[in-house]
Amino acid sequence: MSSGLPRRENIQPKMSYHTAVKRAGLGHVRFHDLRHTFASHLIMAGVDLRTVQALMGHKTIQMTMRYSHLAPENLKGAVEKLDFGAAENNFSHYLDTKAKSQQKRHSATVD
């Protein structure tokens, strides 16, 4: 039974790649260029470095870090995720609660 696909031993990945590039009219594009573009677009889309490392198959995070310069705005976005106004409110609530607790203890010892 034939699946309509070429037999595995007849497939030549390098030749198939070059044929596809030529048909697409891409000019001189190496396979590595596609990997680089894939990683670059992941980083620019805000995907974290560890995920990019796993998807690229990099053994070390240092290899993936080569792409980190493409996302300086992601660093800003990470800081902007912090809601300092809410943090101040939560912290002041904590201080108010602690002060009330201390007042209760103090008034209980005075009585």
Image (cartoon, grey):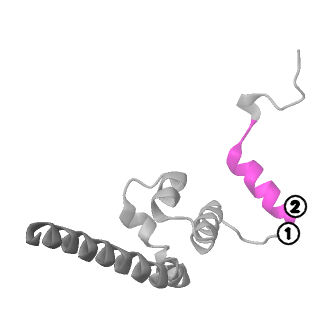
Q: Is residue 68 left or right of residue 35?
A: left
Which amino acid, mark 2? Arg
Q: Which residue is mark 1?
A: 25
Residue range in magenta is 11-24
| Image location of residue 30, percent across then percent down | 65, 65
Viewer-proximal residue among 104 and 65 = 104
Q: Residue at x 32, y 78 (%)?
A: 96
Q: Which residue is mark 2?
A: 23
Disc 2 element: helix
Q: Residue at x 76, y 33 (%)?
A: 10
Disc 1 element: loop
Find the residue positioned furthest to the front: 111
| Image location of residue 59, percent across then percent down | 39, 53
Q: Is residue 2 left or right of residue 85?
A: right
Which amino acid, mark 1? Gly
Residue 46 lies in the magenta stretch: no
The 10 Å Cα crowd at callout 2, few under 14, some 14 to 19, many 20 or more, is few
| Image location of residue 40, percent across then percent down | 59, 71
Q: Is residue 73 left or right of residue 24?
A: left
Q: In the picture, which quadrant includes the C terminus?
A: bottom left
Q: Residue at x 47, y 64 (%)?
A: 49
Viewer-proximal residue among 48 and 96 = 96
Does the magenta stretch mainly form a helix, a strand or a loop?
helix
Find the residue positioned furthest to the left: 109
